[in-house]
Image: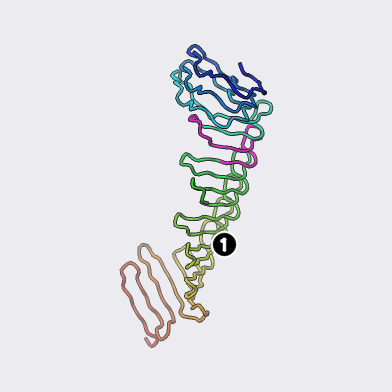
Amino acid sequence: MFYCCSSLNSLPDISKWNTYNITDISGIFYGCSSLNSLPDISRWNSSNITNISCYFYGCSSLNSLPDISKWNLNNGFIFKDIYIGQIKNGLKHGKGKLYDKNGNIIYEGEFKDNKANGFGKCIDKNGDYFIGQFKNDVVDGKGTEYNKNGSIKYEGEFKDNKLDGNFKFITKKGDLYICQFKNGLEHGKSIFHDKNKNATYETQFKNDIPEGYVKFNYKGNLNSIGKYNNEFKELKGKVYDKNRNFLCEIEYNEEGMINVFKVIKANNINIIEYNIDTGKMIIFDKNK
C-alpha cells in the first residue's frame, strides 16, 4: 500500500483500521525512507497475519516503533528481528537498526550484504552495550563494552569474534587488569592494578597458562620477583624492599589441598616453612 513511497514523511491515524481479515502485510512500508514516525499500529487485529516480511525495509528515518509485541499471532507466526534502514538489491546494506519483537534496538550500525559490517553498537537486554567493529556479523577489530550507566566494562581487540590483541578489563570494584590475547587465549604479558594503585602484579601467559616471571609490588615497600612453574602451583623468587635491598628468597608449592610457603635465607634464619591450610610453622636456623 505504501510501497516505495520515499517522499512520505507522516501518516494519518491508521491505528483504527479493521485488519481482522488481513493475512499479508509484507512490504507495507517498504522503501518509505522519509517516514519518521508511525501511528500506534500495535492496536491492529493481527490474529490472521501470516506474513510480515520486509514491512519496514528501507525506513531509514524511523527512530522508534510501536510495541507490536502486543499483536495476537495465534496462527503460529514466529516473530523475527525487525530491520529499519538502508537496503541494496533487497539486502540490508548501509546504515540501519535491528529491533527485537518488543521494539527494542538490539543492533545499530553499518551493514553490508545483509550482515553487520563496519562500525556498530549491540545492546543487551540488561542495558549494557558494546560499540566496535564488525565483519560478517561478528566482532572483528577494536571494541568496547559499557555498563548501562556508561562506565567502561572492558575494551580490547578482536578477530573473528575472538579476543586477539590487547585487552583491558575493569572490575566492579574498580581494579584494572591489562593483558594480551591470541586466538581467544590469554597470551603475553598481564598486569593487575588495584583501584587505589597500592598493589601491582605482573606475570606472563602462554596459551592461557601462566608461565615465566612474576613481579609483585605493594605500596612501593615490598617487591618480589620470581618465576612460575606448573601453572600457579609452584613459585620461586626473591623479595626486595623499596630500595631494592634483598630481604629473602621464597618458595610456594601447592599439592592437593596443602599449601606450603617457604622463606629461605632471611637474616639469621635459613628456612621458615609455613603450611597455609593448617597454620603450622617450622623454623630452621642457619646452624641446624
Instruction: Determine which quarter of the picture holds residue 178.
Output: bottom right
- Residue 162 lies, in percent from the top left, at 57, 47
Residue marked by disc 1: 189
Q: Specify the farthest residue to the right.
A: 89
Element under label 1? strand
- Residue 171 lies, in percent from the top left, at 47, 55
- Residue 28 lies, in percent from the top left, at 59, 19
**Amino acid at pointer 1:** Lys
Question: In the shown orientation, is residue 91 left or right of residue 219?
Answer: right
Q: Residue at x 67, y 23 (%)?
A: 7
In the image, is residue 25 above or below residue 173? above
Q: Which residues are magenta?
A: 101-121
Residue 111: say if magenta.
yes
In the image, is residue 132 above or below residue 18? below
In the image, is residue 113 above or below residue 186? above
Q: Residue at x 57, y 50 (%)?
A: 163
**Nearest the eye: 157 or 254:** 157
In the image, is residue 98 above or below residue 158? above
Quadrant position of the N terminus in the picture: top right
